[in-house]
Image: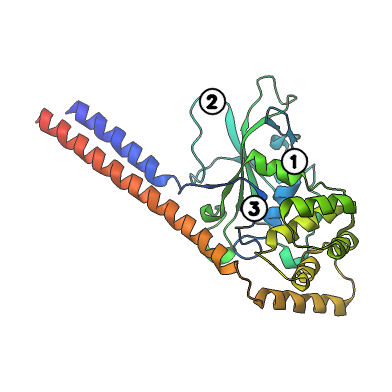
Amino acid sequence: MKLSDKLTSCCVALLLTLTSVSAAIRTLHSIKDLKTINFGQNVPTDSLVLLHWFANEVDIGNNDAIQLTFDPNSDDYGSHLYRNSEMLLEPLPRYNRYQYYTLGNINRDISQRLPDHILNPRPEYAGSNRARIIVRLREPNLGRSVSQTIAQVYITQHYGEYEHQGSRYDPQHTYRVSINLLRQLRQFPLEEDDINTLIRLRDDYGSNANDSELWQIINRWSSLACLGLLLVTVNQKGHRSHSSIEAAITITADNSESDEESSESNRIRLLRNQNRPEPNQYRSECNECSYAKCAKLSCAIVVIVVIVVIAIILWAVLRRSG
């Protein structure tokens, strides 16, 4: 019976591991994939702003190696060790030099501060400090002076306070970010307000903004004009009229109006824009929900199959030993 007891313990451990790991995490491969996420609704828009900053902050080599440019153990940019205790991500192999780190906490007392457009976003797309980036790092062999290689990148968010989940991350709105998406986001540089750059980005990534609207973005966002164009591009759902794009530019613009009347006008435009039906809005919401349901169903099927296999093995062992 000793063999059967050991086998039972192993099977139970395997089952607990399988049932504790979250549903499959979707990978975002391109800006086109970003357009399927409901930024500003299910996911705060500052998640996209944080990801854009991160893509421009890291170093990406010709061999696709992603190097971190700061030390996450020093709390730079709100970073700290993430132990994955709720099994949000795949467990790290034992006896390895990999660790998960999370970054983006704007309330953390840190030496390297996040840029001002992240620390002080407009109220229309502020996310209550919920957005986070998680990286899987391979620790260097020669100490912290050597840059650390990033093996995986994720974008996630804390649950909202109303969901009463404490400080846990929301698995339904956790996404893995491919190196191709990071490269595309780097095409929208920080500190760039050249009209020719915006025209090229508009044409390359399918924005409906015309030249006049690009100038509006430059006037409102100045050196962050490429970020403004990125938000407009990602948030447009299908074909939109130019008046709708103008509303989006106003909503996502980074310089707040000092005058109370303009602020009130912006809020009215925001409400009108949210209430305006868009052709693909409900389709994208359905696609996101369908993906989450399919992922959960797939995991449930895998767990059921494993349970059946374990039961058959136990029955065979017990029968032989009995």
Q: Pointers 3 and 2 in contact (CB under 8 A)?
A: no
Colouring used for the render: rainbow
Circle 1: element type: helix
Determine whether, in the image, residue 119 is placed left or right of residue 261: left
Of tags 2 and 1, which is closer to the observer?
2
Q: Position of residue 50 (x, y in %)?
A: 72, 51
Name the residue rendered at 46%, 48% in the picture: 22
Quarter in which the N terminus is drawn: top left
Q: In the figure, residue 131 lies in which quadrant?
A: bottom right
Q: Amino acid at mark 1?
A: Asp
Residue with the most extreme top position: 142
Circle 3: element type: helix
Q: Which residue is mark 1?
A: 76
Determine whether, in the image, residue 169 is placed left or right of residue 214: left
Above or below, comparing residue 269 to residue 77 in the picture: below
Q: Which residue is mark 2?
A: 96
Q: Position of residue 243 (x, y in %)?
A: 78, 73
Pointer 2 or 1: first along the chain: 1
Q: Amino acid at mark 3?
A: Lys
Q: CA distance from mark 3 to mark 1?
A: 31 Å
Q: Amino acid at mark 2?
A: Asn
Q: Which residue is mark 3?
A: 32
Q: Pointers 3 and 1 in contact (CB under 8 A)?
A: no
Q: CA distance from mark 2 to mark 1?
A: 24 Å
Q: Position of residue 244 (x, y in %)?
A: 74, 71
Above or below, comparing residue 152 to residue 267 in the picture: above
Name the residue rendered at 87%, 65% in the picture: 212
Q: CA distance from mark 3 to mark 2?
A: 35 Å
Quarter in which the C terminus is drawn: top left
